Amino acid sequence: MSLDISTLEVETANGWVRGTVDDGVRTWRGIPYAAPPLGDLRLRAPQPAPDWTGVRDASEFGAIPPQIRGRSLKRSRRRPLMSEDCLTVNVSSPLEPSSDLLPVLVFFYGGAFSSGSSAVRTYRGANLVRTGDVVYVCLNYRIGALGFMDFTSFSTPARPFDSNVGLRDQVAALAWVNQNIAAFGGDPDNVTIFGESAGGIAVTALMCIPSAAPYFHKAFAQSPAPSGAYYPDMHERWALDLLEILRVDESRAAEALSSMSADRLVSATRWMTSKIGPVQQPGTLSVSPVIDGEFLPRHPIDIFLDGESSPKPMVLGTMAQEGALFAKLDNILPSTPERIERMFAGTDPTARDRVLAAYPGYPSRERSVEISGDLVFWYPSQLVAEGHSRVAPTWAYRYDYATRLMNMLGLGATHAFDVPVMFGETSEKIMRALSLLGGTEELKELSVRFQGSLLNLAHVHLPGEDWPRYEETHRHTRIFDREDRIESDPFAERRLAWQGYRGYI
């Protein structure tokens, strides 16, 4: 099939870009949506991207945000560099241009606001574009200390810092989509945001950020942890912890934070988030949004419960065993009896006995891990669904499917394993390995249904004809499994036990 190369040249507000054809879709990569956040723009709100002349090559991914490189981001000939100059978007659209503007999907990656990149293979979105007849956008945003720590208390007249710069990046990218996506065949009046884990937190936060409201119309949050936003006093404490790790005196904070290498900040932040935060304040995420009273006016949970979230259709849900992955690989949750006891002692001692009674067998390892997943992901998502259902169509789900090998490994339907299923990438190496004892066809079939709920939301404004809305009177929840089903108020006893508990606020 021949393709007119001129369809790969697109004019954006800042200049022309030339894309490429990859995996059966047209794609444009590494397009700047904001100015490089370097020099005086480090730790500042994103500024408009500069214009360019000529046609910019958009066939390669832009640099990934500074972070500890995981396996999926190991440097090789075709892997992108790592740099603070990372504020770029990737756009993919169907091979055959449409006469009508198509629904737009904008994805926010996870990684505990400390890792992640739009260049990760799973996130490239070609299957979504081919299957769903949509325009797909994935973007880089600042992470770690450079994006999700609040240093505003160390601002000086000569060197001010802004709050929530990582979230501000996301809003800037959505504004870019609004202004430019029609040139790529996307409908700026039909934009669905979705994300998983930290990306899910971003989705629920954006529902509560007034400046984001004009730029999207529907939302889909996978495994969000909506309580993961904190007031300035807590963030200031974490910022002081980071300075101590860096051996920087508070009086020199502005100068040091402006000039030190990104690598040094990344290493210190990793130590703090893995060795200090989970022990001192179990259940918190020290690299996270700050409730600054302006950009993010109040705690997202309060905004949802007060019926003040952006009244847009939303789907959200969690995995059946969210905490199991963390307990196996990166134990940053309160998934041990010691951390659980410390958490209740430091937040709400009166809730301890009530909550723990809902987990017979505690303090066993299995019950402790369940508590951690419910605390961080499931129960806060219930609060979001409850509040948002009062102002807009809301649908809730729980993802229960696990292959035989996943169950044998003690993982079950755990955190992040829905991501390749959503993207239709069930043939990825890790998914093939986890299907060695069976489950390949079931995963493919589940992918069609799970991905289909997102595509339905994008096209027809609801995730499925047979999926009833979540409402307080019945709390209908779709269970994704070998065969999907609808349950009313699953885990009701646990929900009632957690009721009123807010953790660190």
Image (spheres, rainbow, N blue to C red):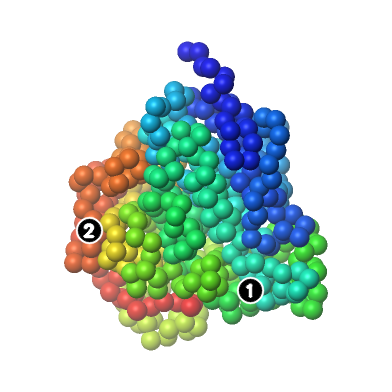
The kind of residue tagged 2 is His
Where is residue 290? Give x, y as percent: 55, 70
Tell me which residue sits at (25%, 59%) in the image. Answer: 470
On screen, residue 38 versus residue 16, left or right, reads: right
**Vertical position of residue 42 compared to residue 241: above or below:** above
The kind of residue tagged 1 is Trp
Q: Residues within 10 Å of mark 1 (few under 14, many from 20)?
A: many
Along the viewing direction, whichever of 495 and 215 lies nearer the viewer:
215
Residue 255, quarter of picture: bottom right
Where is residue 231? Give x, y as percent: 54, 76
**Most distant residue in the bottom direction:** 350
Q: Upstream in the sequence, badge 2 or badge 1? A: 1
**Most distant residue in the top direction:** 1
Tell me which residue sits at (53%, 71%) in the image. Answer: 294
The residue where tag 1 is placed is 238
Residue 381, quarter of picture: bottom left
Which element carries disc 1, helix, strand or loop?
helix
The residue where tag 2 is placed is 476
Q: Residues within 10 Å of mark 2 (few under 14, many from 20)?
A: many
Disc sitting over residue 67 in the figure: none
| Residue 276 shows in this picture | no
Where is residue 203? Give x, y as percent: 45, 56
Which element carries disc 2, helix, strand or loop?
strand
Count of numbered labels shown in the rendering: 2
On screen, residue 272 versus residue 455, left or right, reads: right
| Residue 344 shows in this picture | yes
Tell me which residue sits at (55%, 46%) in the image. Answer: 176
In three-dimensional space, the C-alpha distance between marks 2 and 1, rounded to whole angstroms, equals 39 Å
Tell me which residue sits at (39%, 44%) in the image. Answer: 190
Along the viewing direction, whichever of 363 and 190 lies nearer the viewer:
190
Along the viewing direction, whichever of 315 and 56 lies nearer the viewer:
56
**Vertical position of residue 401 compared to residue 394: above or below:** above
